Amino acid sequence: MADHRAEQIVARVKTLVTGLTTTGTNVDRGRGEEVAAELTPALRVYMGADTIVEPWAQQLLDSDLEVVIEAKVHDAAANVETTLNQIRKEVNIALAADYTLALAFVHAIVETGAGRPQISGDLAKPAASMELRYLVKYRRSRADPSA
């Protein structure tokens, strides 16, 4: 049996944002984990709320899945906000290339915004992060969430 469709979506997003010019292969799943300075810039991809939009359908359910991509940087040579915005641009381009994420059950992915950059650390080598938020509308079977 295939994974839950929400898992398939998050895994696909991770694949699409792997290999960007800024972050390269420094892409992982999960949230809240510190990233070593030598492994940044980096992305963390994780799932937010998965809300059923129309719960009264007999066989199929439409859901809105929030996907969060957290950009992390640790840099003294560049302005961290500038780097975060470059990452944001590259992520947007990667995810906008196909609004269905090349998954037949996805209706669309839309950008819903970005959080305020969070900056901390030593002023000589600041660390920063920013959440990039997306909403994915998808359809699944009521009886089998992988179908």
Image (tube, rainbow, N blue to C red):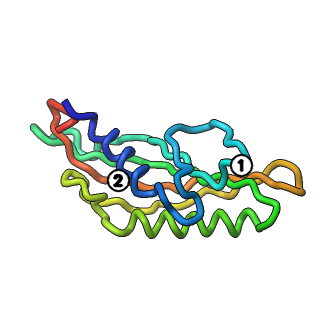
- In the image: residue 102, left or right of residue 97: left
Estimate the spatial distance between the alpha carbons at disc 2 and disc 1, rounded to whole Å. 32 Å
Q: Amino acid at mark 1?
A: Glu
x 19%, y 54%: residue: 104
- In the image: residue 48, left or right of residue 44: left
Task: Determine the secondary structure under disc 2.
Answer: strand
Q: In this picture, is 9 found above or below 97?
A: above
Q: In this picture, is 16 found above or below 89?
A: above
Mark found first going from the N terminus, 2 or 1: 1
Q: Are marks 2 and 1 in contact (CB under 8 Å)?
A: no
Residue topped by disc 2:
136
The quarter of the picture where the N terminus appears is top left
Residue 31 x, y percent position in the rendering? 57, 38
Residue 116 x, y percent position in the rendering? 66, 58
Q: Which mark is residue 38?
A: 1
Where, by quadrant of the figure, is residue 117 drawn? bottom right
Residue 121 x, y percent position in the rendering? 83, 48
Frontmost residue, 29 versus 105: 29
Frontmost residue, 68 versus 58: 68
Q: Amino acid at mark 2?
A: Val
- In the image: residue 44, left or right of residue 15: right
